[in-house]
Structures are given as C-alpha cells and as structure tokens.
Amino acid sequence: MNWLFSLILTVHVLVALGIVGLVLMQHGKGADMGAAFGGGASGSLFGASGSANFLSRTTGILAAIFFVTSLSLAYIGSHKPKTTGSVMQETVKSQPAPAAADKKPAEAAKPAVPPVSDSKAKDVPK
C-alpha cells in the first residue's frame, strides 16, 4: 500500500506542475484579437485557434486527473490501518509504573484521605 501512495503522490505532483506550465503557456483573452487581424498565430503548429483549444483541453484533462489523485490521496491517507491502537495507548505504555505499585499491599489498600471523625461531623449543618 505504501508503494501505491508514493506512485499516486508522484503523479499528483507531476500533474500539478503540468497544469502550472499549461496555464502559463496559454494566451490571455486580449491576445486573440491580434490573431484575428493577422498577428502571425495562424502560422503556428495548431493554427489560429487550434493552440487555444488544445491547451485548454489538455489543462482540463490534467485538472480532472489532479482531482482524482487528490481524492485518492485523501482516501488512502484516512484509511491507513492502525497497527498499534490510539496515541493515548502508546503514551500509557511508555510511562513507568505508578509509585503505588511499589508499596506493600497493606499500604496500597489504605485510603488516601483519612476518614472524617465524629466531632467534625457534628459541626456540619443538616
């Protein structure tokens, strides 16, 4: 399962970099006006409007892949098997035994608070 997480994370990062590159290569809305009046874009590899369609479609496909890898990483990250239990169980196991275990059984059985004597009980209003 760890290799799958690494693979999806690698694809996720590469797709993110691809989206950034494609967005930076695309022309703004104002750049299309120059192509309409013979701005030289008609002689490019994709034609006058072909590059815009190709780049926008590729960006959309990479965005969909980015979305799927994001959901996959979230699912894998939240459904990892717990091998040791909770965090609190680990801290309890790593702490030393309490001092009460070192005492003799008779001392450990004594209550920590002394019992209330009868003279003090009479002072308490009913």
Image (cartoon, rainbow, N blue to C red):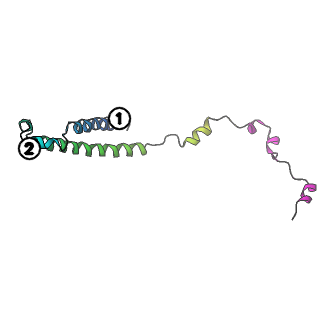
101 vs 50, left or right, is right
Figure disc tally = 2
Check the image and report above or below for 78 versus 119. above
Residue in the picture at 71% in, 38% down: 98
Viewer-proximal residue among 104 and 92: 92
47 vs 24, left or right, is left
- Residue 17 lies in magenta, yes or no? no
Q: Amino acid at mark 1?
A: Ser
Residue under label 1, please give it: 6
Neighbourhood count class around disc 1 (C-alpha, 10 Å): few under 14, some 14–19, many 20 upward: few
Q: Which image quadrant: the N terminus?
A: top left
Residue in the picture at 79% in, 42% down: 108
Residue in the picture at 89% in, 58% down: 121
Q: Which image quadrant: the C terminus?
A: bottom right
Q: Secondary structure at mark 2?
A: helix
Q: Which region of the structure is painted magenta?
A: 99-126
Q: CA distance from mark 2 to mark 1?
A: 46 Å
